[in-house]
Image: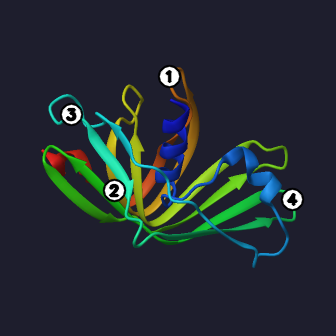
Amino acid sequence: MLGFRRVLAALAVSSAIAGLGAAPALASNNPHDRQLQQLPPPFTQPMCGPAIGDVTLSIDPGTFRAATKTFTLQDGTTKIQFNGYARQIVQGNGKTLELNVSGPGTIFIAPGGAFITAIGEGHLFYAGPVDTPQQGLFLYTGHVTLALINTAQYGPIFVVSSHTGNVTDVCALLR
């Protein structure tokens, strides 16, 4: 399940989030410090329910260009910006979908290391694991705010706390 948490985080914000626990250590006052992100591994789970069965999520390695810039704000808050391009591949129920999930996104972390919020703009792919409040697969276009919650099965995960713009139920596209 630890692997799923890493994949979920990576998919939640521009498909390219590095570990939140290490984010304060990456902080710098130079906004030009750009770090390329690693391609998250494929993940399979029945996120759309038993009627569809297992769904595999992966990022197209041929088009993946994600990078972060880390800033320290005047109040000590760490701001991590995600930019680049990613194409999400969703396979399930005999179908394959390719989705533009190219943020950008921003994460804010308090000076003590506590997560504050995450913001997604543009295209954000949300993967909600089985048995969580927002189970399923959704493509948001517009402005999305994410909050961190703790779950018994997965530990901390992102959930969508507000959004504007369009929402596409990716599970419905797989039916």
Q: Amino acid at mark 2?
A: Leu
69 is higher (above) or lower (below) than 134: below
Residues under numbered marks 4 and 3 in contact, where contact means CB atoms less than 8 Å apart:
no
Q: Which mark is residue 153?
A: 1
Distance from label 3 to label 2 (Cα)?
A: 19 Å
Of badges 1 and 4, the one in the foreground is: 1
What separation in Å lies between label 3 and label 1 (alpha carbons)? 20 Å
Q: Position of residue 99 (x, y in %)?
A: 30, 64
Q: Residues within 10 Å of mark 1 (few under 14, many from 20)?
A: few
Taking the image as shown, residue 16 lies to the left or right of residue 60, namely right
The amino acid on which the numbered mark 1 sits, given as a three-letter code, is: Gln
Q: Is residue 101 above or below residue 158?
A: below
How far apart are the alpha carbons under marks 1 and 2? Answer: 24 Å
> What residue type is disc 3 on?
Gly
Mark seen at residue 75: 4
Please report the residue visible at 63 percent of the width from the left and 53 percent of the height from the top.
18
